[in-house]
Each structure stands twice: as structure tokens, then as C-alpha cells.
């Protein structure tokens, strides 16, 4: 009988893990607290008086340096899901028409419960059970935690202290993201780096496949974001708009839209293990914090964990008690 597997988190790592497991014949269900899949590969659209502005307010682009991942990227490129963005680098890729195009594509054939916040999990005699807000789900043969390290630690600590400690040792850096739409193009280059409180600013509307008014994303530096982490979003948006004006070196036209979003867990650490898997418990963890702060590493982490679980679940001589690695 095919194993039943729950994956907590429908970011790139969770989606890649689910894709690999589904391909092996497992029954997979993902649980994600957001309104759509993708995690930090997010795109927000804002209505303005001259049209809808689009903002990739999470990951700005991704690279493909691993051979396996690069082959998948080429397939996605041929399907029109991703395209190169030369302004960001020779190996930079973006989703088309937004960064969320990639996770939406990966999620098409998957069973995902959106708006499902998992508060806890417990392993009982019949398998794993998840505690949601107002309900439960289960039993499952295996559970995968595909969340940022800080969120993963609280769930993993209930069952595997070694995994939880690994997550605690990989804290994330925060990031405030400003999203600004203008009635006319701003002067200067389409990308700005390391300008005062700004770590990165880019003309989002100049990416391949984008339409709509002039749209800029401004990512504050980790230090600035930490110092202003609990500030009101309106105050942060105003401060980042002023920082953008200073970086451009000229007065900006009145913005059509001025919004800020806080990523409390933006840039991950790197545990250097790729993924974690406790075969005896049927518990795994994946995410960029296990391989490095890149979209590519998140995908590889999930894909590799999915392969490891499939090998254990479908092997007739599965080794019981494999240590988390």
C-alpha cells in the first residue's frame, strides 16, 4: 500500500519534496498557512489609477548551478514558466509573469490545504497526526517539516531534539521589503545594491514578462530590518521610499502605491546537511536553511529528501533506525 505523507509548508522545498514523492507513487498532502503556494517566491499585485502594479517582494531571482536543477530550469524555460534576467547576472532566472509562476506550476498536480496552520504534531500508534486550528489531520506514515528554521524548530522539538537543535543553530535574517509604484520611470540603472539602508532595489517592471506601471522593490539590509523589525509598516514604507530617493539621487514622483511587507525569516542560514531524515520516526525536514540561502538549495533539499523517503518507504529491506543526517 502506498504510504501517506504530510508535508508542512508549501514553499519551494515542500513542493519539490511533494513532487518527488508523488512521482514515486506516495499519497502526499501539503499543509500551508498562506493563501497560495510558494513561500518567499511571492508576487503581490496592487491596483493603481493607471493599472495593476506587480511586485516580486520576496526572492528577486534564482540561479541554476546544480546540473539536476539546471535541467529542470531548462524545461520550465521551454514551457514559458521562467526566463533569464540578464540585468541581475548571466545566470539569473525569474518566474514569468511573476516569481510565483514557478511554485504555481509545481503545485498544479498536488493536494494542498491552504490557510492550514499546523500548531503541533504527534506520533501515535496508527501514525502521525497534525493539530490544526480547529481540527486535526491524519494518520500519516511520514511527516516532513518544510518551514524556515525558527518555525521548524518548534515543531521538530516535540519529536526529535537533534533536528530541533540543528534548526535553532541556523537562525534567519529578517528583511523589510518596500513596494513602490510610480506614474513614470525613475532615472538611473534598474538595479541598485548596498545604498545605505538598502541592500537591494530593482525595477520590478523591467523583468521579463512584466506589465503595468513603473514598479520598484526595495529590500532593506538585515541590520536595518532588525533595528526596525517591529516598526509600523507605514513608517517603514516611508523610510524606504526616502532611502530610494537618496539612492537614485533625485526627487521621486509621488508614488501611486507605497506598501511595506516584513519578512521575519528572509535569508536562511546553512546547516550544511542538505536535509534531515529520521527513518525510525518517519520524520524529515527540508529547506534552504539546510543547504544555503538560495532557491536552488531549497529545491534540492526537498527533492533529495523526497528521494530518501521514497527509497525507505518502498524498499523491501528498509533499514530501521537510520540516524537523522
Image (cartoon, rainbow, N blue to C red):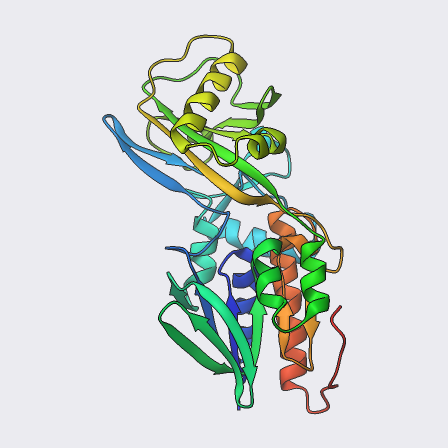
| In front of the other: 287 or 156 | 156
Please count the marks in the image.
Answer: 0
- Above-or-below relation of 190 to 266: above
Place of residue 84 in the rendered image (x, y in percent of width and height, measured from the top left): 55, 39
- Look at the image and tell me whether residue 175 can be seen: yes
Residue at (51%, 22%) from the top-left corner?
Answer: 190
- Above-or-below relation of 112 to 54: below
* Drawn side of residue 163 relative to residue 265, left or right: right
- Look at the image and tell me whether residue 148 can be seen: no
| In front of the other: 309 or 141 | 141
Place of residue 26 in the rendered image (x, y in percent of width and height, measured from the top left): 53, 80
* Drawn side of residue 97 relative to residue 149, left or right: left
Q: Residue furthest left?
A: 49
- Above-or-below relation of 89 to 143: above
Place of residue 322 in the rendered image (x, y in percent of width and height, measured from the top left): 75, 79
Residue at (63%, 46%) from the top-left corner?
Answer: 172
| In front of the other: 133 or 74 | 133
Place of residue 55 in the rendered image (x, y in percent of width and height, measured from the top left): 41, 36
Q: Residue furthest top?
A: 250
Position of the C terminus, as image quadrant, is: bottom right
* Drawn side of residue 69 relative to residue 180, left or right: right
Would you identify the image quadrant in which residue 196 lies? Answer: top right
Amino acid at each position: 500500500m502506498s504510504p501517506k505523507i504530510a508535508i508542512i509548508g508549501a514553499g519551494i522545498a515542500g513542493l519539490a519534496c511533494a513532487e518527488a514523492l508523488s512521482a514515486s507513487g506516495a499519497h502526499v498532502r501539503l499543509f500551508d498557512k498562506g493563501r497560495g503556494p510558494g513561500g518567499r517566491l511571492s508576487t503581490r499585485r496592487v491596483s493603481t489609477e493607471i493599472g495593476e502594479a506587480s511586485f516580486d517582494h520576496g526572492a528577486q531571482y534564482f540561479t541554476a548551478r546544480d546540473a539536476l536543477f539546471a535541467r529542470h530550469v531548462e524545461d520550465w524555460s521551454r514551457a514559458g514558466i521562467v526566463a533569464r534576467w540578464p540585468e541581475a547576472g548571466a545566470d539569473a532566472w525569474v518566474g514569468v509573469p511573476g516569481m510565483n509562476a514557478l511554485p504555481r506550476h509545481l503545485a498544479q498536480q498536488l493536494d494542498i490545504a491552504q490557510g492550514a496552520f499546523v500548531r503541533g504534531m504527534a506520533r501515535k500508534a496508527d501514525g502521525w497526526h497534525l493539530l490544526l486550528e480547529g481540527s486535526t489531520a491524519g494518520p500519516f506514515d511520514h511527516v516532513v517539516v518544510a518551514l524556515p528554521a525558527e518555525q521548524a524548530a518548534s515543531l521538530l522539538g516535540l519529536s526529535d531534539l537533534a533536528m530541533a537543535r540543528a534548526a535553532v543553530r541556523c537562525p534567519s535574517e529578517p528583511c523589510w521589503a518596500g513596494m513602490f509604484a510610480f506614474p513614470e520611470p525613475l532615472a538611473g540603472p534598474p538595479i541598485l545594491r548596498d545604498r545605505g539602508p538598502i541592500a537591494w532595489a530593482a525595477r520590478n517592471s523591467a523583468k521579463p514578462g512584466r506589465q503595468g506601471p513603473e514598479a520598484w522593490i526595495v529590500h532593506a539590509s538585515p541590520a536595518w530590518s532588525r533595528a526596525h523589525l517591529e516598526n509600523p509598516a507605514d513608517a517603514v514604507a516611508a523610510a524606504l521610499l526616502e532611502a530610494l530617493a537618496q539612492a537614485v539621487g533625485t526627487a521621486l514622483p509621488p508614488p501611486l502605491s507605497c506598501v511595506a511587507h516584513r519578512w521575519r525569516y528572509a535569508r536562511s542560514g546553512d546547516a550544511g546537511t542538505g536535509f534531515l531524515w529520521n527513518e525510525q520516526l518517519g520524520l524529515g525536514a527540508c529547506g534552504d536553511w539546510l543547504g544555503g540561502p538560495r532557491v536552488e538549495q531549497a529545491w534540492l533539499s526537498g527533492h533529495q529528501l523526497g528521494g530518501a523517503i521514497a527509497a525507505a518507504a518502498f524498499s523491501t529491506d528498509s533499514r530501521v533506525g537510520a540516524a537523522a543526517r
